[in-house]
Image (cartoon, grey):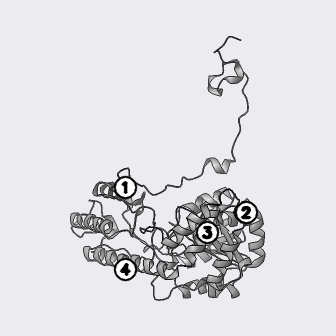
Amino acid sequence: MAMGIPGPSELDEAEQPPSAPERPAVRLRAALESLPAYVPGAAGSNPGVFKLSSNEAPFPPLPAVLAAIADAAEDINRYPLMYADRLAEEIARHHGEVADRVIVGNGSVAVAELILRGMCEPGDEVVYSWRSFEAYPILVQVAGATSVQIPNTPDGRHDLEAMAAAITDRTKIVILCTPNNPTGAAISHSELVAFLDVVPSNVMVLLDEAYAHFVRSADPIDSFALLPDHKNLVILRTFAKAYGLAGLRVGYAVTRRRLARTLRTASTPFGVNAIAQAAAVAALGQQQAVADRVGELVSERERVVAAMRAQGWDIGDPQGNFVWLPLGDVAGAFATDAMEAGVTVRPFAGDGVRVSIGESEANDIVLELTARWASSSGGDAADTTGVGGSLQN
């Protein structure tokens, strides 16, 4: 064969001559070929643009965490602990639990994926509110199960009555996200107790509390107090938000011993890297500093919410480190305006915009933008200039 002329085996399928027999191609599962895309928050190419699109903590890492990272970096030629044992012990101690009830993973999303893969088979159903965390539809589909999405109430809350009614003999898991991402509404403790009382004991209730630290409602959930009486309850938490370790990916679940033991066995070996484990242990030891930072963010949230309400916005009662603007079809237009103003926000096409609480300067830019949008609507909720149904009359 002449040099430089590819043979038949070197040709791409599309380049095969018409006479070449069709060759079978490698195929993914059909469920994966139709996966919805997870869209991360935009970062912006200009370093002067504030990122308010990913619900990240705006603070730099705590000094104790940085020191732990530096120490751990000296040993990265060694594998980390298989199941993040020391971190699991510290998490258990923090919550008054025992370590063999803790599952640690590469972010709370990875732990949720592990649980769904471990629990679901084709034909099983997973019930959750919608709109909620964008990863849920992806995780359910990858696990081979079927999503049963229950619409949020008009104020962005979980419709717990409708969710309970949607449970059938095919339901394996119900996911509750509280505060709900992206709408910010939180389930109360009494609401959760009433819901758990009507859910069959063989249906898992996966309680995603990624933003639990920021809740300041009158009846906040005390999830760990419910574990002894509700063996089908699984609590999911993360170090990404309040602890500010989003870049290291550490999350965990707390559940009954037998389930935790089995799921750990099915998890990815050495799934949480050594630096992340060390950083999370250090962060757990800085509870007062973490609480102070969370307090600052909550104060900023309250300032932003009060200002937006004064402008005429109806934004419910946000309990996360973000606010939700139900802008409907003009969510993209608002996000474009925000980028031009100097901040990135997270639009959800057809529904609204989630705006993280960040630095005061960034929040002020957002408030200037929302004031302009409110002014352009003239306070009319039916106005077509872009604010749509998100303003109070």
- Residue contact at pointers 1 and 3, CB within 8 angstroms: no
Q: Earlier in the sequence, mark 3 or mark 4?
A: 3
Indicate which disc residue 267 carries.
2
- Image: 75 above or below 224: above
Query: Relative to the observer, which residue lies in front, 185 or 50?
Result: 50
Query: Marks 1/2: CA distance?
Result: 38 Å
Q: Earlier in the sequence, mark 1 or mark 3?
A: 3
Looking at the rendered structure, the secondary structure element under dot 4 is helix
Query: Marks 2/3: CA distance?
Result: 20 Å
| Image location of residue 100, percent across then percent down | 74, 77
Q: Mark 2: few, some, or many residues within 10 Å (few <14, many ≥20)? A: many
Residue 252 image-quadrant placement: bottom right
Residue type of the residue flagged with mark 2 = Ser
Query: Marks 2/4: CA distance?
Result: 39 Å
Assign the C terminus to one quadrant of the image.
Answer: bottom left
Q: Please report the residue visible at 44 percent of the width from the left and 78 percent of the height from the top.
A: 294
Looking at the rendered structure, the secondary structure element under dot 3 is helix
Q: Which residue is mark 1?
A: 332
| Image location of residue 286, percent across then percent down | 52, 79
Q: Which residue is mark 4?
A: 299
Query: Relative to the observer, which residue lies in front, 362 or 374?
Result: 362
